[in-house]
Each structure stands twice: as structure tokens, then as C-alpha cells.
Image (cartoon, rainbow, N blue to C red):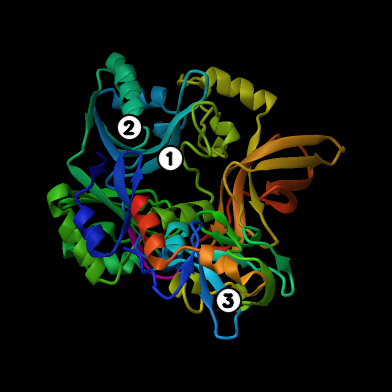
């Protein structure tokens, strides 16, 4: 029996088509995922992301703990509210999960981790936390709504109190603030401006309805996937997992090897991989008709004439570009030509950096 | 529950067939099929004058979710294709039994029409899903 978020009835009221998403009954779309996608690129859309796992970490040594647990360095977080994106790795440098960590106070950090990896994440975090005497508490009583798009902040402002508006006014990207009952963060998974709003369960339906009344369009997991893929953002379990190094998943920028005296889980292997080189995650653009899909075979011809193989890890039809796009993992070589096997035919595709659209504009 | 117009014939693979007074037939995919596929992004059409046999894959409906082969329900010659779908494939979603038609075929073995599913039989196959 799949779990339901507190917004389940709200989804049905907006004619959602519900699907099982890793044990959660979630909306895949409310009619047309392409229209929902365009709403986020051009106006404002909202997603129920209450299935995601919020974990609060408290203790005097919580910063030391996270500097050991995570591949990115929370020492970079100097202002309360500041957040960063990071991988949590195994000692072998496989990605256990990708997550956002917020610095709330010197003895209090907050993690937002994937729901599909909830159990293993909590087990791993708890196991490592013991030595640092850090208290790990999941916050299942909190719901989360992501409001995203060029008009998202303006529309959300009509719903916030004056006090909340004052608190979020001018807040830079990747910050979060507890404003009244809401924790409002300038984060997201779409490549657009907006907020992720953590709200007590009992108030979630009311907030959803107010946003709906403010003209924010409900969007399902279908649009969420095409938006994040256009923005070049990874999906855990697809673009990386415990068998993949963050260096081979376009997450090298989140792996903080400096300062060199910081010991963290996976460090030794990451240093070796960095020195020796890894595969890489690249963008592919289909310039002919069709749609790229996850799991397609990739052939890479290098400039020295050698041939290599790879695989698409995510693929879709990009509603913004009206073209097939994909992320693919390929060996790190000087690429001359890339082909993808689509429906038993080899098709030449264009190699691009793994980001296709940002702030509503094509970047490829 | 999907709409299943009673005047049409159906296949188990979710195509519909509408027989015209001149003996030709229009073919498309059912409302149920487009719901399963989600937003359509490309429709690959057959060529006019192609000779096809019942069960041949003749077109492809590619949605955000998947590419799905479209099989000709009957044998015959393709006499027209819905070129509008090249620019507006969403017509398959918005009006699957009307403007979302995919091709028109002149049957070479009209008796094959009798082997297709009635609306009632097709609706029953959906109940079993």
C-alpha cells in the first residue's frame, strides 16, 4: 500500500493522474506534462515534494560530523541559512545519495535527501553520527512544496505574510530561512528561480490552495523530470548511484578536495580517481526527429580514431528545445563523433555540456 | 473510464478503425492508448501508396514517456496520412477519435474488418488491465 502525502486530495481535486513513485502515490501530471513544463519555464508552477526526507542534525560537533560525512565541505557555509549541494559517498567513493545541506545554527544543520534512498541514508547517517554525538531526527511532520518559475517569487509573495516577505526579500540563491511557520529556501530542481517551502503538515493543504488561487499551476513528476533534465540536474538512481563516482556524474564541482587536511568518507579513492581520470557525464542533443531515452547505447569515436562505448543515463523530449536531449556517461576522450542507438538504428547526435536550459533560455 | 465510441472497430493493440461510405477506413489510436502514452511529441506517419498487411507496424507514436508502434488493423493501401500531426502531434491527445486520426487505408481484404473487436469487446479488454 503506497504512502500518500497530505496533499493527496488536493492532487485529485486538480485531476491528477497518480502513480507509484518508490512507495509514494504521487501525481505524474494533471493532464499535460508539457503544458506544466512550459508553465514553470514561462510563469509559475508548483510541485508536491513532501515525499522527500528532511533530516535535522543537532549537536555541538555537527559541523565536524558533516565535514567528515559529505564530499562537499560545509565549512564553506559561513552565514546561517546558507545551503550547498553535495554527494554523500561510500568509502569506495560511490554516491549513496545527493542532497542539500542547510546551515541553520552552529549546532543545527538540516539535510534534504531523496525519498527513494530514505532508509539507507538514515542508516548510514546514524551509523556515522554516533562518534560525533550528533542527534539525527527525521521530520516526517513537515511537508514541502516547490514553487518554481520566473513569476514564482512574485506569486508566492502574495501568499506570504508581510513578515515573511521581509525575511525572504533579496535572499540569494541557495539560502533558507525560518519565517514564521514556514521554512522558505531559494532552492529548486528546475533551473528556474523560486522557492522550496517546508510547511507543517497541518498547514500544507491551505498553502497549496492559496498558491493555486494565486495562479500557480500544479505540476507533476513528469514535468519535474523534463525540467531537471533540461537544467542538467542529476536524478539519483539514474544518473548516478553507489557504483558511480561523483567525479563521473558531473558532480566534480561539489567534491571539495581542498583543504587537503579534511578527512571525509571516500576521500582517498576520490583523490586517486581525480589523478587518474574517470568517465564523464555529458549532454547529448538530437538534431533529428525523435526522443532520446535512458539506457540507450552510445558509440564514441575519438579524434585518434579509437572507438568507445557509453550509455545514456537520462533522456527525454525537451519541451523548451523541441528536441531529444540526454545525459550520457562516456569515457573521457577527445570526442570526434557520438552516435546513439535509437530503435535499432545508429543516429549521430551532438555532444554538448550537460545543461540545456537555464532561466527559461536555451543554452545549447 | 475511457471513452470507447460504439460506431468504431478496435484492435487489442489499441488502434481504432472507422469505415467510411466509400469503403476506405480511418485509423488512429484510442483515448485509452493516448492516456497511457501521455503527451505526444512525434508521430511518424506511413507513406501514401504503401501497401500494408494486417498487423504490420506502419507508424510510430512517440510520447514523452515511450515510443509505441502503430499496427495496421487491416490489409490495404494507404491513401492518406494526417500531415497535421507533424506540427501538432498533441491532436492525438486532444481528439484521438477525430482530428488525431493517423492514416486512411483502402482495404484489400474488407472481410478482415469482421475480425476486429467491437466497442463492447474492446472496452472489456480495458477492464481486464
- According to the picture, the residue beneath numbered tag 2 turns out to be A118
First-in-chain label (1 vs 2): 1
- According to the picture, the residue beneath numbered tag 3 turns out to be B25
Q: CA distance from mark 1 to mark 2?
A: 17 Å
Marks 2 and 1: in contact by CB < 8 Å?
no
Q: In the depicted view, which residue is nearer to us: A116 or A28?
A: A28
Q: Nearer the viewer, mark 3 or mark 2?
A: 3
Q: In the depicted view, which residue is nearer to us: A90 or A118?
A: A118
* Residue A291 point in image, percent of width and height: 61, 56
Q: Is residue A52 left or right of residue A294?
A: left
Chain at tag 2: A
For the N terminus of chain A, which image quadrant?
top left
Q: Is residue A308 left or right of residue A52?
A: right
Q: In the depicted view, which residue is nearer to us: A262 or B70?
A: B70
Per the rendered image, the range of residues in magenta is A42-46
Marks 2 and 3: in contact by CB < 8 Å?
no
Amino acid at each position: 500500500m503506497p504512502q500518500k502525502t497530505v496533499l493527496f486530495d488536493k492532487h485529485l481535486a486538480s485531476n491528477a493522474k497518480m502513480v507509484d513513485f518508490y512507495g509514494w502515490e504521487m501525481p505524474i501530471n494533471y493532464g499535460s506534462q508539457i503544458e506544466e513544463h512550459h508553465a514553470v519555464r514561462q510563469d509559475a508552477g508548483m510541485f508536491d515534494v513532501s515525499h522527500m526526507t528532511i533530516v535535522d542534525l543537532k549537536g555541538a560537533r555537527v559541523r565536524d560530523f558533516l565535514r567528515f560525512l559529505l564530499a562537499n565541505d560545509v565549512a564553506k557555509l559561513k552565514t546561517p541559512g546558507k545551503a550547498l549541494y553535495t554527494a554523500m559517498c561510500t568509502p569506495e567513493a560511490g554516491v549513496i545519495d545527493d542532497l542539500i545541506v542547510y546551515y541553520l545554527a552552529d549546532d543545527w544543520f538540516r539535510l534534504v535527501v531523496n525519498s527513494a534512498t530514505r532508509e539507507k541514508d538514515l542508516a548510514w547517517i546514524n551509523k556515522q553520527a554516533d562518534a560525533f554525538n550528533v542527534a539525527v531526527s527525521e521530520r516526517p511532520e513537515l511537508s514541502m512544496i516547490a514553487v518554481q518559475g520566473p513569476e514564482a517569487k512574485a506569486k508566492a509573495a502574495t501568499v506570504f505574510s508581510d513578515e515573511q516577505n521581509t525575511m525572504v526579500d533579496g535572499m540569494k540563491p541557495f539560502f533558507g530561512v525560518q519565517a514564521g511557520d514556514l521554512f522558505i529556501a531559494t532552492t529548486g530542481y528546475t533551473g528556474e528561480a523560486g522557492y522550496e517551502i517546508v510547511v507543517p503538515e497541518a498547514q500544507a493543504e491551505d498553502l497549496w490552495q492559496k498558491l493555486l488561487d494565486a495562479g500557480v499551476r500544479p505540476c507533476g513528476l513528469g514535468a519535474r523530470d523534463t525540467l531537471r533534465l533540461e537544467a542538467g540536474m542529476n536524478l539519483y538512481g539514474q544518473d548516478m548511484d553507489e557504483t558511480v563516482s561523483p567525479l563521473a556524474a558531473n558532480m566534480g564541482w561539489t567534491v571539495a578536495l581542498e583543504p587537503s587536511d579534511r578527512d571525509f568518507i571516500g576521500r582517498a579513492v576520490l583523490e586517486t580517481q581525480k589523478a587518474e581520470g574517470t568517465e564523464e557525464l555529458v549532454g547529448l542533443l538530437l538534431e533529428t526527429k525523435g526522443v532520446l531515452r535512458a539506457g540507450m547505447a552510445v558509440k564514441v569515436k575519438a579524434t585518434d580514431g579509437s572507438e568507445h562505448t557509453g550509455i545514456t543515463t537520462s533522456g527525454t523530449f525537451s519541451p523548451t528545445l523541441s528536441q531529444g536531449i540526454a545525459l550520457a556517461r562516456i569515457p573521457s576522450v577527445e570526442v570526434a563523433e557520438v552516435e546513439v542507438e535509437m530503435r535499432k538504428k545508429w543516429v549521430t547526435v551532438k555532444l554538448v555540456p550537460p545543461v540545456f536550459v537555464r532561466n527559461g533560455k536555451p543554452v545549447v | 473510464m475511457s471513452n470507447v465510441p460504439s460506431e468504431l472497430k478496435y484492435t487489442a493493440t489499441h488502434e481504432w478503425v472507422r469505415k467510411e461510405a466509400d469503403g476506405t477506413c480511418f485509423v488512429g489510436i484510442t483515448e485509452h492508448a493516448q492516456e497511457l502514452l501521455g503527451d505526444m511529441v512525434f508521430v511518424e506517419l506511413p507513406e501514401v501508396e504503401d501497401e500494408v498487411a494486417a498487423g504490420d507496424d506502419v507508424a510510430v507514436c512517440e510520447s514523452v514517456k515511450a515510443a509505441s508502434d502503430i499496427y495496421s488493423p487491416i490489409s490495404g493501401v494507404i491513401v492518406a496520412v494526417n500531415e497535421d500531426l507533424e506540427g501538432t502531434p498533441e491532436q492525438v491527445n486532444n481528439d484521438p477519435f477525430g482530428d488525431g486520426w493517423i492514416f486512411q487505408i483502402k482495404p484489400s481484404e474488407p472481410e478482415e474488418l469482421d475480425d476486429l473487436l467491437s466497442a463492447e469487446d474492446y472496452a472489456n479488454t480495458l477492464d481486464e488491465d
